[in-house]
Image (cartoon, rainbow, N blue to C red):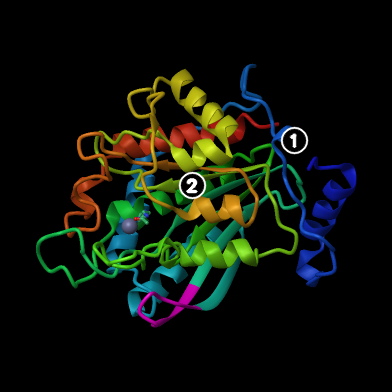
Amino acid sequence: MAQNGNMKTKVIIGLAISTLFFTACGEEPKTSNSTLPSKPKEAYRITPPSFNADSAYQFIADQVAFGPRVPNTEAHIKTAEYITEKLRSFDANVVVQTGVVPAFDGTKLNIQNIIGSYNLENYNRVLLMAHWDSRPFADNGTERKNEPIDGANDGGSGVGVLLEIARQFQQKSPNVGVDIVLFDAEDYGQPTGTPNPKPATWCLGSQYWAKTPHLPNYTANYGILLDMVGAANAVFTQESISLYYAPQIVDKVWNVAAQLGYTNYFPFMKTAHVGEDDHLYVNRIAKIPSIDIIQYDANTGSFAPHWHTHNDNMDVIDKNTLKAVGQVVLATVYNEK
Ligand code: AHN
Ligand code: ZN
């Protein structure tokens, strides 16, 4: 279905007067591939600022210092306050969406999806996403398997990069609207080895948000999810869900990476299914074409060896990787008109 002017008008109205709790916008707007911007061919419209990896690193260390960010814990609440305050300090318009969702084991999880928006009046929008919770157990490890992990890379890194991007938006506004959506409870899925695994036990915050976005009729031209973007020598391949729903966005982002000389991090390599992630629900339910920048380890055919173990701590975080990912995402956003 093609997006028409009437729908754009609805989106503008929805965004502009959402603070008045306007809800009667009618049918959900849909985005089609035909309305997406084409891949950048000209010079940048605004020179992208330089992403500061030291700053991103510090935002990761700050999160990890609160302890594991597991829903229904004190560290989780404290970290939500920290992220919210950081986004506000960078002049984002912040909305915290709260909810209660059942985990695989019946635990009622108190979740908070944290949204920081820029240029709210602009109907041309880019959605930037990460999850901010960390895994409640180390089920892929060999020791202390029932204790929660630091999640420096899995949880901390995506948020760290996006907080630094928010800091850059404060200093130099991009030409498009941007929504930074930080999902809760991505990582509370069933332990590895559970018979008849249910993928929907993961990504609880994004499923919640995709069904009920923080603004009525919310949409964006496209989305970029960051997951595990901080480890040394990470390789981000083009994964199958991204290629299925948003091949043109994969193309756009990997071409920006190539222009910036980051093909070692972003090789033009397609990988089969590496696991479901938040972008699946943003694509399937919210209908926003979205990609996942996620580390894939060709040696194991899986994620990095520290994945869901206690080795996922600050020791695995590398500023060069943060710089590559942050600069690619910044350049992509500032290239939009
Ligand atoms: C599954 O294992 C089903 N999905 C992987 C998504 C994930 C977990 N990302 C980080 N932690
Ligand atoms: Zn995880």
Residue 335, located in which quarter of the rendered image? top right
Q: Residue at x 26, y 39 (%)?
A: 301
* 3 magenta-colored: no
Mark with earlier residue (1, 2): 1
Label 1: few (<14), some (14–19) or many (≥20) C-alpha neighbours in 10 Å: few
**Which disc, if any, is residue 35?**
1
The magenta segment is 101-111
In this image, 165 relative to 337: left or right? left
**Residue type pointed to by label 1:** Thr
Of the 4 image quadrants, the one containing the C terminus is top right
Q: Secondary structure at mark 2?
A: strand
Q: Residue at x 41, y 67 (%)?
A: 201
Q: Amino acid at mark 2?
A: Leu
Please identify the quadrant where the N terminus is shown: top right
Helix, strand or loop at mark 1: helix
Contact check, label 1 and label 2, Cβ < 8 Å:
no
Q: Residue 75: percent from the left, percent from the top? A: 34, 74
Residue 188: image location, x then y, percent: 36, 68
**Which residue does the image show at 74% across and 33% down from the upper left?**
34
Distance from label 1 to label 2 (Cα)?
A: 20 Å
